[in-house]
Amino acid sequence: MKAIWNNTVIAESDHTVVVENNHYFPAESINKEYFKSSNTNTTCPWKGKASYYSLEVDGKENKDAAWYYPEVSELAKTIKGHIAFWKGVTIEK
């Protein structure tokens, strides 16, 4: 699977985990040069507290377009160490 934004592959893996129709990519599969830490946090009732990354590709920013759970609940342990995307990031085979 590939995560693509602004015509650039930002993550690629044969081992994503699908939860609630989102592909979670292993952290080691992202192209780190496109990711910037964000101060944004949200809370999911069953997964835990999410943290975000903004994407920057060719001078364009996509704020808070990737999220992950630094500490996951027992119910969400399959996505520990994984990152998911939204806000215009496309997922392709």
Image (tube, helix red, strand yellow):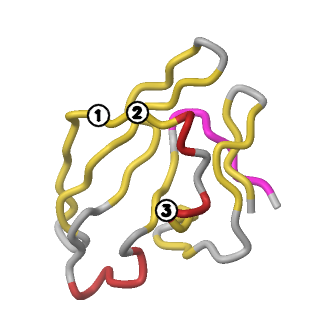
Please name the residue that numbered disc 3 is placed on.
27
Q: Report x, y in % for residue 37.
A: 33, 36
Can you name the residue that lies furthest to the front here? Answer: 33
* Mark before the other along the chain sequence, 3 or 2: 3
Q: Quadrant of residue 21?
A: bottom right
Q: Is residue 75 left or right of residue 3?
A: left
User: Residue at position x 40%, y 70% from top?
Assistant: 81
Magenta stretch bounds: 87-92
Q: Are marks 3 and 1 in contact (CB under 8 Å)?
A: no
Please name the residue that numbered disc 1 is placed on.
38
Q: Report x, y in % for residue 46.
A: 21, 74
Can you name the residue that lies furthest to the right here? Answer: 93
Please name the residue that numbered disc 2 is placed on.
36
From mark 3 to mark 2, how far is it between C-alphas? 14 Å
- Name the residue type under label 3: Ala
Q: Is residue 37 magenta?
A: no
